Amino acid sequence: MLDIDLASPVPVYDQIKAGLKGLVSKGQLRPGDEAPSIRGLAASLKVNPNTVARAYRELSIEGFLDTRRGGVSLIADSAVQVAKGGLGDAREAFADAARRARRSGLSWQELSEAVRTLMKEEQ
Amino acid sequence: MSTAIRLEGVRRSFGRREVLRGVTASAETGKVVGLLGRNGEGKSTLFKILLDLLEPDSGVVEVLGRRPDGSGELRKRIGYVPERPVFHDFLNAGEVLEWRARFFPDWDAPRADSLMGRLKLDPATKVKGASKGQLAKLAWVCAAAHDPDLFLLDEPTSGLDALVREEVLGELIGELHSGGKTILIANHRMEELAGVIDEVWVLAGGVVSAAVSVDSLRAGACKVTARLHDWSSRPSVPGAVPLPSERPLAAWAAFTREAAEALAGSGGLDVVERKPLPVDEAMKLLLRDGADV
Amino acid sequence: MSENALSLSGAEALPAARPLLGRALALFGRAPRSYAVLEARRNLLLYAGWPVVILGSLPLAAAVAMSAEYPLIQGVAAALLGWAVAGLPLTALLFGAVAGAGLRGASEEAEASLPLSPRTRAFGALASAAGALAASTALVAGLILMAAPDAGSLLRAMSEVGSNTWNRTHWEVMFSVLTTLYCTPLALSWLLLVSFGVSLVSAHAVLGGVAALFAGAAALLPVLAGLMLQMSTEGKAEFLFPAAACTSALLAGALAAVAGAAAPALRAGRWGAARALLLALLPLAGSLAAWPALYRSRDRALAATESVVSAWDRSRGGVSRHLVPAIRRSLGGRLVMERPEGDLVLLAGWTPTVADLVWGKRLSEVHQVFWDSKGMLWVEAWHPGTQGAMPSTEIYVGRGDGPLRRYLTLPYQMRFTADDGRACVDPEGWAYDSRTYVYLDPDKPPILKRQ
């Protein structure tokens, strides 16, 4: 369900948050769905449940998750907005990077090459 | 108590051979600590001391708030999985657990049963001739069924096939979920645990040469490359180790952001580039070269 | 998990004010008992199979006896004697070694995570080995009682270990040895303990067994010797009680020491193993108590049978017999004379060593002692003969103020006597009237010539 790169410098809880937001943006998770259990997600990702718990806490604060009684978390109604907002940040970051690359002397050709290489990596 | 394990200046020799030369480290309750160390560097000795099976020659040892006194009482609250689990070969898995139940006042038989079920271990499996995976599963049940506060795991997944490894790791993570449990786990393949452990202790030269939090490693470890003007005075900084380099480029592995910045700031370097270093690489380098982190 | 996890259970929950009692009782708590049972299960094949071996040896021995044309029952008796004298001690060594070495090695790894103290494990293993040994011992004792023609006499023989023991049936001898020696807290438990201790410390069963064999033999030799000595004299085996009491007390202490300290000592670093070995060999100290007892019994045995000799005064014609209190015959056929100064002078015979007495060397007997008309003391001593040689008679002569010298060796058919105040030998038989005897002159070499 979620792809976590344990070797990446991005903190794991951030990756979890981004991953869940991504699923909601793509429509695979909808508001009202039950979020994966902390224990189950931790086990399947091979991460410390505390890390997952931290991610869920922050998502709850951001309004992405609704924590109900009994430890169950549901995707909140406002989740889609939060996700898109999150995605907006990602889009901004990419644009920033592209601008900086251009300023450093990269041509549009070289930039497209770079993106194509990334696409290839993912496939 | 807030500290599950406290070691101060622990020394232990066997005859002339000094195995532990002043180990100092501590683990807070609830933390998962990975113990990184080469074979024969004192890992098992350290475990045995924590288990109250060996007495240190000197130094302070406190486990779960108590000093080990030789009586073995501590082991009622510890779950231990040895590197090569051994059981009495005239028993089967179910009998092994039955016998253990007699010695642990907090043994939870239904819990043991459900663990066996989840791990798909048949109680009738005879110890003699059991596969490595079956023995590892049994070792896990033996360690977890009495709901210990501290887990001491010595290479619990080594030599196991991927499926069994997954199952054991899953159980381990499940234990963490209930909270309040501390885990000290020695594992050669730290990469599979990189998401679970909070801290890494590097055991080298008979001491814990480095105790770093994994989060800080993940966030700050990077590879620094630069052009070096003067090769005779190569900068060295605590928290960074030099990597094999080809002139005129010099490379280092820096384990913290501060170390990387110190390197970049030190004179004689040009065109400094920083690339994030994967956590498992960082841990391998920590073990190999130590770093004074 | 709160502190409740550490609350001691059952017999271990005693007030801290009585820690020693608490620790002693804790040895009998649930966990140690369970551990003893586990140890028994681990060695089940040996502990349960041994009685089968014992029983199986009997028909085997009977078959051997039959094939050598001896009666069946003698084969069985020989087998049971073998078990009593050699088999059970070896069993003690074996069980001790297996139990001790078994605590190290694979068992140690398998049980590393159990919350048992090394003391508990050692005690449990020792208890199960001792139980198995007791079972085998009881079996042998029971078999002897069953096979003996008169069980009642056996039980009586237990309390009367003395020289008359050798006159009893071999069943009674065997049973006396078995119960007097091995069922006291001596031989078997000792061997078990030393074997266990050395095996535990060295983690090597064979080393432990062999070391215990030598060490145990050194410790038990004096006790055994004392027993044999006692059996050469009349009276009950009283001497054993001081030795047994000392060694039992030391044994009880040593038992606690081994189980209590040798095992935990292995956990420590510096000098831990050396300390453990020392503690494992502590039971041998009990043998030190037995050595003085041995010498005491020897002296007792020797003294008890030093009876005053009546030496004939043959200086004049006629026969009169005086008790010469200064001259005594003792065990071993020694003839000693007590001088006015109070010391003893050996007149004839030899002083047996402990080894001689233990191994039952047949001793010479002094038959006749008399003074002749010249005031010379003559002694006739009969030797049983060694290595198949015929028994012989030796004649000693001397002044009686010092050792006698051997004057003549006679074949046993010849009789030696005195006539008319002179020592003489009758070469062909007693014929007083026909004067066929020859006179002996102490100052001249003996010439047997007809007068």
Image: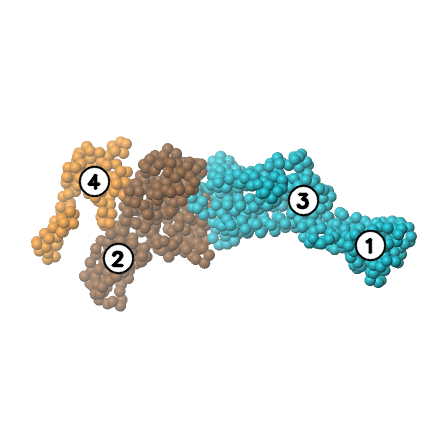
Chain colours: A orange, B brown, C cyan
Name the residue that disc number 2 marks: B253
Name the residue that disc number 3 marks: C240
Q: Quadrant of the N terminus of chain A?
A: top left
Residue B143: tell me if it is visible: no
Badge 4 sits on which subunit? A
In space, the residues marked 4 and 3 are separated at their CA atoms by 84 Å
Q: Are marks 2 and 3 on the same chain?
A: no
Badge 1 sits on which subunit? C
So how many labels did they put on this image? 4
| Tag 2: amino acid | Ala
Q: Residue at x 55, y 38 (%)?
A: C55
The first of marks 1 and 3 along the sequence is: 3
| Tag 3: amino acid | Leu
Report the side of B211 relative to C103 (left or right): left
| Disc 1 secondary structure class | loop
Farthest-out residue, top:
A69
| Disc 3 secondary structure class | helix
Q: Nearer the viewer, residue A90 or C292?
A: C292
**CB atoms of marks 1 and 2 within 8 Å:** no
How crowded pointer 3 is (Cα within 10 Å; few <14, some 14-19, many 20+) is rated as: many
